Amino acid sequence: MCFPLFIELPLQKYYEMKRTHIIILVGIAALIVGLISFGSDFSTYETIVSAQKKIGKSVHIIAKLDKDQPLEYDAIKNPNYLSFYAVDSLGGKTKVVFHNSKPTDLERSERLVMKGKMQADHFECSDILLKCPSKYKNKEDLQKKMQEQTTSMR
Amino acid sequence: MKFEGEHLLPGQIGQFFVILSLMAAFVATISYFNAARNNIFLEKNNWIKTGRVAFYIQTFSVFAVFATIMYICANHLFEYMYAYKHTSLELEYKYLLACIWEGQEGSFLLWAIWHGVLGIILTKKSNEWEAPVMSVISIAQFFLMLMILGVYIGNLKIGNSPFTLTRNEIQAPIFSRSNYLTFIKDGVGLNVLLRNYWMVIHPPILFLGFAATIVPFAYAYAGIQTKRYADWINPALPWALMCAAVLGVGIMMGGKWAYESLNFGGYWAWDPVENASLVPWLLLVAGLHTMVIFKATGHSLRASYLFAFLTFIFILYSTFLTRTGILGDTSVHAFTETGEGIAFTLFKHLFEFKYMNVLIFLYLTSFTIPSLFLYFKHYRKIPAIQKEENTNTREFWMFIGSLVLFLTSIFIIAKTSVPVFNKIFNTKIAPPEDVEFGYNKIVVLITTILGLLTALTQYLKYKNSNTKVFFKSILLPTIISVVIFIVLIIFYPFTHYKHGAGFLGAIYVAAFASIYSAVANAMYIFSIQKGKILNAGSPIAHAGFMLMIVGMLISSANKEVISNSSSNGITLPGGGIDPMTKQADNPTENLTLLRQVPATLGDYRVTFLNDSAGKENGKKFYHLAFENKKNKDNFLLKPDVYLMKGGNMSSNPDTKSYLLKDVFTYVSFAVNKKDEPEDTTKFKEIPMSFGDTAFYSNGIMVLDTVINNPTDARANTGIVPQLALVAKLKIIAKDSMHFYANPILTLIDSNTIKHIDDTVYAQNLFVSFLGVDKDKKILVGIKEANKLIDYVTVKAYIFPMINLVWLGLVIMAAGIVISMLQRGNFTKLQTRIVLIATVAFVFYMFLLAGA
């Protein structure tokens, strides 16, 4: 075959490609795929105020249920509409809309980790993780329980 | 102060054995370590004997500790924190073991028990490898015992003892009284989420898998330590195979458990806890393959070392991830308690003497650093063949496969470890919006590669393959797979449009590759191995694995939401319309069922009939009648909700299994009746004769007759009444719907009258049989509620072909076990017994037990 030398040389190399080369190629390919998926996937933790500057972008917010504001959920009218207000530790406030059923312990939760996108007037939430006080059997809870037990005996 | 009624002896016995066990592990480690380094036969033998005795004492002590905890828990000795925290009086006896491994101490103990059992087998079977192998296992036992030691050295506490007393652990005024025990009426009990037969069987199997990963690690260490760099593969391989089977089954048991009793709607969620056990399994399988390559060709020894080390290192890393609480918010089912705190910075945390986390971190690093150090130090001395494999050989492509598994595990663990990076580097990277898709889109590509590799490589030969023969033998499997694939596309296309055409295409490609591999491997058993099942471990395992993947692809890609509101003609706001599926982009998966009002869910007419109480206090089953509109196939599903103290709720699904699909439903929202204000309206009294008509706001009701039926199930509340009058009323609503109400008046004895009212939920109507007036007219009471009375909100899915997943797993386990028995030189009789027992057990657990 009559290829110009600058093509011929790499081609020759290609034919001589051995295990190590293929392994390196597979590794690089995997790395690229992995990196792409990493880079494009990850969201960030934001405060309510900083999320309000990133309207439409997928973010995570850690906040608390604002118990002074109304929580709206009527399973008979629409089981897929929940709205409430959330406040974060920096005092940011937002209305939250969650198109799903109301997580059962929402009112009792200490902390909410919400995924979703901030809209102009509310946070469109796609998933809520709750942190509830008694999910773990930690010492404080047991202590409280034991104290309750005692006072009830008096 | 002297406290009354405490049983302090069991705790002292238990604590004695904890310390004895720790000491014995220490002695065993030193003895075996000396034995391994000693070349004088007599001295070496003496050290081995000492080590052996110490190890036996150690294992015996671990069992004794376990038995003591069992005794304390079984007898509800609430003076012990462990019993107070994990048991309660109402708990059924079968959950006794589950209570023990609910706690961190108990699960470390379970791990140590398995190490002990494996160690004893190794002292009998490992011959000249005993010293170095057992020194590794002994030191692991030492660390595990440290975790449950619970001793203070100065201000530093080492480990958490399972034998601490409640009064020392928590402060409460009752402990100032000598008779405090009479005030502790009951313990906290087992977390309701864990009250399930899987909690009894899943942890022991999974921990056996975890524990067994130390054996290949120990052998690899022995290879370096003895400088017999290549000889360890032979004895280690059957162990690695055993471990792969047990760990694989253990992981999938977790999946089956989640599927049966958790409400995330599936068997796999790429949850950190799941990933943490999957990653070591992938590494182990990669190592298995390189070990097989080495045995056949002499290649890949260095890789075998690395994988054997990494498998156990990642078991430890997983323990670190899941037990220290470092994952914080990311795990949905971190059931077992986590160390102490929730959010913390890694190093800050370590140096603040969160002692358990320090210990776990030490356990991790004391195996990781020395093993990797030795590996790189001896790397050049580990023999390797300089000539590279040809690309037409089995070993070449098997190695590529191992490499793919390795990269997959790195990908998964890197993604899972993001919370760790966040804590170390103080970043705030959050998981992606759709966590599962983040994994699935990569894994679907990997599946394709693995499918093709396992299909084709099986037909290649070691060292050199005849290309012509290869193509000839692969031709028929290829044609058959293509046919099956085309049939699948035509009759059962995938409908997973949610992530776009690209992903859908990737699913198709992956499905073809895995079908191809399942078919090619299954045919290999007959075409090449002439149907000799006991020689065909590898193709059976590969065919099973790929069948499992096919099942996973179909059941997830064609998972159908039938509680979708849009399928009921109700249009709802929210979410745009996907141009491809013409469905709401953000599918609304909850549907509210009003009591007694049928609703359409896919092919089914579903009616919420009533609810019933469960055995445990606070458990409520919702009876949902499913009626197939096409073939009149009727069944009842009873998903339940568990109301815990303080208003916590947990919801457990119920599933109707068919051969080809599962109908799966769970309660996503239910009203806690106690929260609802009491209905205080009085019954309106209407005197009626037979045939009379009375009005209510939405229609009329007619009194048909009254019968005396003391055997009516509703009237019989413990005692059969003397008299039970049942009024038969027909109710005709304005929209001409007919309903029936049968209120009852019972006379239990001459002066006790009881009313059993009936409710027509669809009409918000309560009907009562109040009595008989002096004109012999029947007094019917009616009450109309202005609010809908009873409803439940559910999600319901159809998982097609999910049985393929479980069946594939059973076949895979059988295949690996066959390989193990073959490589371990078991007799034919032993082989048959072990194989049949394994298959029967796994088949029963996955395909029969839950159904």
Image: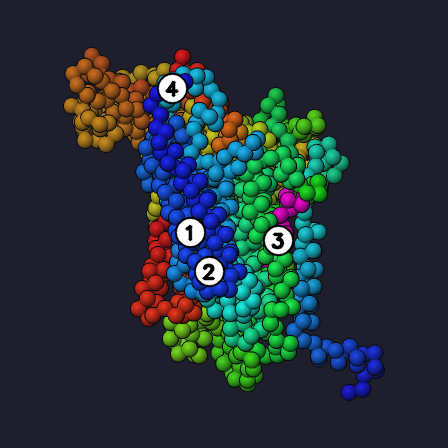
Disc 1 element:
helix
Q: Tell me the mark number nearer the camera, choosing from 2 and 4.
A: 2
Residue drawn 71% across and 40% down? Answer: B426
B687 displayed left or right of B749: right
Residue drawn 31% across and 64% down? Answer: B833
Could you tell me which chain the residue with mark 3 belongs to?
Answer: B
Q: Could you say which disc has been placed on residue B55 in the image?
A: 1
Q: Which residues are magenta?
A: B408-422
Return the disc, 1 or 3, that comes first in the chain's sequence.
1
The crowding category of the residue bearing disc 4, from other C-alpha atoms within 10 Å (few below 14, some 14 to 19, many at least 20), is few
Q: Main secondary structure of the magenta part?
A: helix
Tag 2: amino acid: Glu
Q: Could you say which disc has been placed on residue B369 in the image?
A: 3
Disc 4 element:
loop
Using the numbered discs, state the Cα–Cα distance from disc 2 to disc 3 in whole angstroms: 30 Å
Q: Residue B843: where, in percent of width, then height?
A: 36, 58
Disc 2 element:
helix
Q: Tell me the mark number nearer the camera, choosing from 1 and 3.
A: 1
Which residue lies under the disc numbered 2?
B43
Asked whether the residues under marks 4 and 1 belong to the same chain, the reply is yes
Which residue lies under the disc numbered 4?
B2
